[in-house]
Image: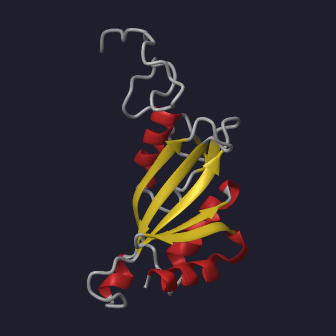
Amino acid sequence: MTERLLEQVTACLAERVLDRHTRLGDVTVVVEADRIAEVLTLLRDDPGLRFNLLVDLTAVDYLKRKPRFEVVYHLASLETAARGRQPSGIRHRLRVKVGVSEDPCELPSCVGVWPAADWMEREVWDLYGVRFLGHPDLRRILLYEQFEGHPLRKDYPKERRQPLMGPRN
């Protein structure tokens, strides 16, 4: 089943797929960073796939690798599962990965595709420093604005002292 889903996704995305694989029942495709919004829109709107739910969006820091970061989108199709197109117990899920260089550390926002990406992109910005171009309100979501750096980067010094927050008004 996962092989068939991988073939459907590859046919939908065509030359946009840089790499693809299935492991342990999970389907993964790797795409170019500058085409991510286009790819996610195609996956959402394709009548055979209908990946209409952004389950999660996160990042991984591979400190010594080029590109250093990888932004990972976890998608699901509620429609396809509801129509009974998947045998019982089989998930209709997809992982989309995008490599992001350290400089510039940016990627197009997918808030226009899924509004739910808003806070997820803010979290990735806050903790990893990946800037999402076109995001409507890209600011820290977990840490305070005066916090310096991005603490989930592997080169972030754990002993680093941060500026103290002033009193709240």
Percent position (x, y) of residue 22?
Answer: 50, 72
Q: Residue at x 39, y 76 (%)?
A: 77
| Residue at the outermost right position | 15
Identify the coloring.
secondary structure
Q: Is residue 144 above or below residue 67?
A: above
Q: Is residue 41 above or below residue 147?
A: below
Q: Is residue 63 left or right of residue 157?
A: right
| Residue at the outermost front position | 24
Q: Residue at x 44, y 57 (%)?
A: 115
Instruction: Name the image quarter holding residue 65.
Output: top right
Q: Is residue 139 visible?
A: no
Q: Is residue 82 above or below residue 164?
A: below
Q: Nearer the viewer, residue 157 or 57?
A: 157
* Quarter of the image with the N terminus in it: bottom left
Q: Is residue 53 left or right of residue 40?
A: left
Instruction: Name the image quarter holding residue 56.
Output: bottom left
Q: Nearer the viewer, residue 162 or 68?
A: 68
Instruction: Name the image quarter holding residue 104.
Output: top right
Percent position (x, y) of residue 160?
Answer: 45, 12
Q: Residue at x 53, y 79 (%)?
A: 6
Q: Nearer the viewer, residue 59 or 55?
A: 59
Q: Is residue 26 visible?
A: yes
Q: Residue at x 48, y 18 (%)?
A: 157
Q: Nearer the viewer, residue 59 or 139?
A: 59
Number of numbered callouts drawn: 0
* Quarter of the image with the C terminus in it: top left
Percent position (x, y) of residue 2?
Answer: 45, 80
